[in-house]
Image (tube, helix red, strand yellow):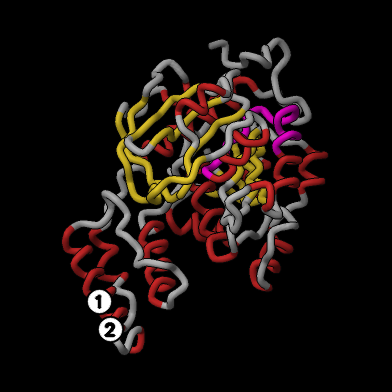
Amino acid sequence: MPLVAHNDLPSFDRLRAEGVTVLSAERAARQEIRELHVGLLNMMPDAALEATERQFMRLIGQSNPIAQFHVHLFTLDELPRGAKAAAHVARHYERFADLRAAGLDALIITGANVGHADLTQEPFWNPLREVINWAWDNVTSTLCSCLTTHAVMQFRYGQTRVCQEKKVWGVYPHRVVDQRHPLVADVNTRFDVPHSRWNDISRAQFEAAGVRVLVEGERGVHLAVSADGLRQVFFQGHPEYDTVSLLKEYKRDLLLAARGELPSPAPFPAHYFGARARAILEEYAARLRAPAGGAEAGEFPEALIVPGLDNTWHDTAVAVVGNWIGCVYQVTHRERSKPFMPGVDPANPLGL
């Protein structure tokens, strides 16, 4: 499914360099391929803003070639931004009001950093509710990532996330527990997914809300869908992560702990670093804790770690997102103001 570069977003050039097919708007206009318009509500903080664009656009662009994808980026005005990120948003992102008027075929909503245990106190709470409620009636399917899954489960289903004793942090094995749904058609019955979260919605909570669990792992549910089978898709993990994403999070937390901004040293993410990487990082952490601290520790040894990292989740992530797009393509109306084709039952659009 080629992405269409309908603006000058820098992420398009980065994706082209990786080998992802990205068409110019002029070339796309000459092809007789159906368009799908996918919104991406990016709520990530400044440091991860552009990486998150590329992660989700990469998954979309690497799925099956049945449509041209116009990805429409937007964010929430209520989220604080530094000058550089604000300029990037002002130049390349669209306004929700305009997208609402034009319509979308599908919507992805990223996670976000939070500062409160109570999500209702976050600045994004009310505007996110507005987007989700609009999408329920006007978008064929909304894919909710991690924090957004927790927010939607709270305000739409009355299920509040539960803080865990330890951070769910690493790459965990998962198993398909409901093979009948087309979202998991032809994917491995066992596969890995990265997680990075303190909070959890349990399987019992999903099921109490009438939400159908499709994939579960040793640290809880990863993939679930609303009762109609498509309107809302929930991820608790981060299948969009790059190979180095958890390494960058580990580096951030390790340096914060060294400065006294976290109460304890960063633990290793589970099932991610090999023995050599752990030894290198333990030595570096010891130098950080030495009396001279960061002055003697030197640069973080990222160049020594990256060659030994494995990615055991990306292929399955592409397959699941490809299945999701296929479902949207199957039932969405050609007029973007109408989320379903005539004759499609909104309560069971996939005929499950």
Q: Find disc 2 in the rendering and name its residue.
A: 290
Magenta-span inclusion, residue 264: no
Q: Residue at x 26, y 80 (%)?
A: 287
Secondary element at image label 1:
helix
From the viewer's side, name the closer residue of 300 and 8. 300
CB atoms at circles 2 and 1 under 8 Å apart? Answer: yes
Magenta-span inclusion, residue 144: yes
Magenta range: 132-146
Q: Find disc 1 in the rendering and name its residue.
A: 286
Q: Residue at x 35, y 42 (%)?
A: 313
Amino acid type at image mark 2: Ala
- Residue 343 is situated, as x and y percent measured from the top left of the image, at 70, 10
Q: Is residue 248 left or right of residue 88?
A: left
- Residue 312 is situated, as x and y percent measured from the top left of the image, at 30, 44
Tell me if mark 1 has few (under 14), some (14-19) or many (20+) residues whose alpha carbon lies within 10 angstroms of its own: few
Residue 76, disc: none
Residue 75 seen anywhere in this rendered image of the structure: no
Tell me if mark 2 has few (under 14), some (14-19) or many (20+) residues whose alpha carbon lies within 10 angstroms of its own: few
- Residue 271 is situated, as x and y percent measured from the top left of the image, at 26, 49
Q: Residue at x 49, y 55 (%)?
A: 16
